[in-house]
Amino acid sequence: MPEPVLRCSGLRKAYRSPSGELPVLRGVDLELAAGEAVAVTGESGAGKSTLLQVLGGLDRADGGELWWGGERVDALAGRELARRRAGLLGFVFQSYQLMPELDARENVALALRVAGASGRREALAAADRLLASVGLGGRARHLPSTLSGGECQRVALARALANRPRLLLADEPTGNLDEASGAAVMDLLLGLAREQGAAVLLVTHSRSHAARCDRRLVLRGGLLGLG
């Protein structure tokens, strides 16, 4: 049986405040298979974004184990963890997180260079292909400030897919979009991920978006359970 793309066991995370320690994750267990789409829902403040940050190696758990593609990574140092992350994961955030001074193709090309594209010309050509795949072939030279929210999120999706990730982590990717734009972004996200054979872990408040995934989980009381 193939190794899960993502596996964690007993993940714990707490934050410290003047009033004491605030537990957020109390022992999360999860496995995600290649090509599988899993939605995580839960109340605001339940820790969904924290969970995604920890699973993606952007924040460190206080305890538990984290495995990417059969390799344990929770104890890796920052630089080595970043290298493994760049080769395996893609991220889509609610706030897009595009570089405002770079146009759409340059934003995607930057991700390609980080992922190992050999030169600027190669990276720009690949960025053009990726932008065309998300319906933005004619908007490649536009700055984020001149794009709509839906277009910015499509650029962010193209950037996330630049390294052909085995795992795509999406944190409320439609949260800033109207219903029609959000549905279009979900069509692209799930469709392109499946074309590439990537697993998807989607954090969302939308029941309709969650229903499109293969499994639906709820984060409640610091633990993941069936939705």
Image: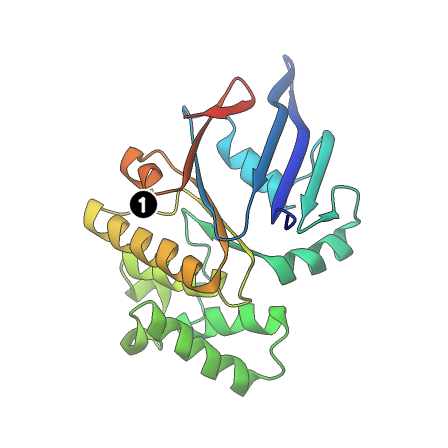
Is 138 positioned to the left or the right of 118 in the image?
left
**In this view of the protein, which residue sits in the foreground, 86 or 140?**
86
Find numbered disc 1 in the image and state the secondary structure of the residue it sits on.
loop
Residue 47: x and y, percent?
52, 28
Residue at horizontal 69%, vertical 40%?
Answer: 66
**Colour option used:** rainbow
Residue 95: x and y, percent?
41, 49
Residue at horizontal 62%, vertical 18%?
Answer: 22
Instruction: Tell me where residue 190 sits by quadrant.
Output: bottom left
Question: How dense is the environment of label 1, judged by Cα within 10 Å: few (below 14), some, or many (20 and up)?
Answer: some
**In this view of the protein, can residue 142 be seen by the observer?**
no
Residue where numbered disc 1 is placed? 176
Q: Is residue 9 above or below residue 100?
A: above
Q: Residue furthest bottom?
A: 121
Q: Residue furthest front?
A: 1
Residue at horizontal 71%, vertical 60%?
Answer: 83
**In this view of the protein, can residue 64 be seen by the observer?**
yes
Instruction: Tell me where residue 51 sits by quadrant.
Output: top right
- Amino acid carrying label 1: it is Asn
User: What is the quadrant of the C terminus in the image?
Assistant: top left
Is 216 positioned to the left or the right of 78 in the image?
left
Residue 123: x and y, percent?
53, 80
**In this view of the protein, which residue sits in the foreground, 158 or 196?**
196
Q: Residue furthest top?
A: 19
Q: Is residue 13 above or below residue 144?
A: above
**In this view of the protein, which residue sits in the foreground, 146 or 210?**
210
Give the tally of numbered discs. 1
